[in-house]
Amino acid sequence: MIKAILFDLNGTMIDDMEYHCRAWFGILNNDLNANLTSQEVKKEMYGKNSEVLVRVFGDKKFTMDEMDKLSIEKEKRYQKEFLPELKLINGLDEFLKKAKSSEIKMAIASAAIPFNIDFVLDNLDIRSFFGAIVSADDVTTSKPDPETFLKAASLLNTSPADCIVFEDAPKGVEAAQNAGMKTVVLTTMHEKEEFAQYHNVIAFVKDYTDPFISELLPNTK
């Protein structure tokens, strides 16, 4: 029986990655003239926003203050477009309730900035389910470094081996593997084949109505 569940946020709890792609595409290409294709933008979308900018433009292009401003602007555009569509991935609301009733600890472990995490938790009124929240601001190195997941486990007073991670991105699965944690992958943005190199994936699911999900919480059927 698992003792804790660590959730990535974007693409894992809400199906919003296409909206992040659109926001980044506008910032990188229309504002900053990076001249990237949509697929190239998608490939760079992992880790902290500042890390995305450094990967695309190098570490000499922007000051940290400039990157912070670009980060907030990107998230404002994302939030404005996505807010009318904001909802939990199908079945997650019931899964959260059942996990809580089973006294399984839960945490958010995301590379998102607090501005975005608050946007989701407060608009959906689900903050009370989580005993810990780890954001981009809480770690030195983001995914695929294991720090995000290890810190979340520590805050829940749970060993990594007793945690299950829910993720949607290869770099997130790699971070969980580096942390010694098993992972359930939501196929909202990436195909199964993109995770072939990782040995910690225990299931691929489209959403939280998949029969495998109920097997994680056998006492709540």
Image: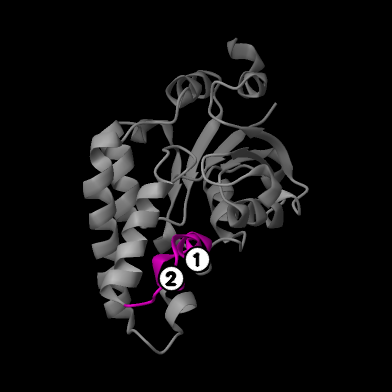
Q: Quadrant of the N terminus?
A: top right
Discs 2, 1 touching: Cβ within 8 Å: yes
Residue matched to label 1: 40
Position above or below: 203 against 94: below
Residue matched to label 2: 36
Q: Write down the region rendered in magenta.
A: 33-52
Q: Position of residue 128 (x, y in %)?
A: 36, 32
Picture residue at 45% right of the left edge, 38% below the top: 131
Pick the residue in front: 77 or 152. 77
Circle 1 SS class: helix
Position above or below: 37 against 198: below
The answer to which image quadrant residue 15 occupies is: top left
Circle 2 SS class: loop
Q: Position of residue 214 (x, y in %)?
A: 62, 18
Q: Quadrant of the C terminus?
A: top right
Badge 1 amino acid: Glu
Picture residue at 67% right of the left edge, 20% below the top: 215
37 is within the stretch colored magenta: yes
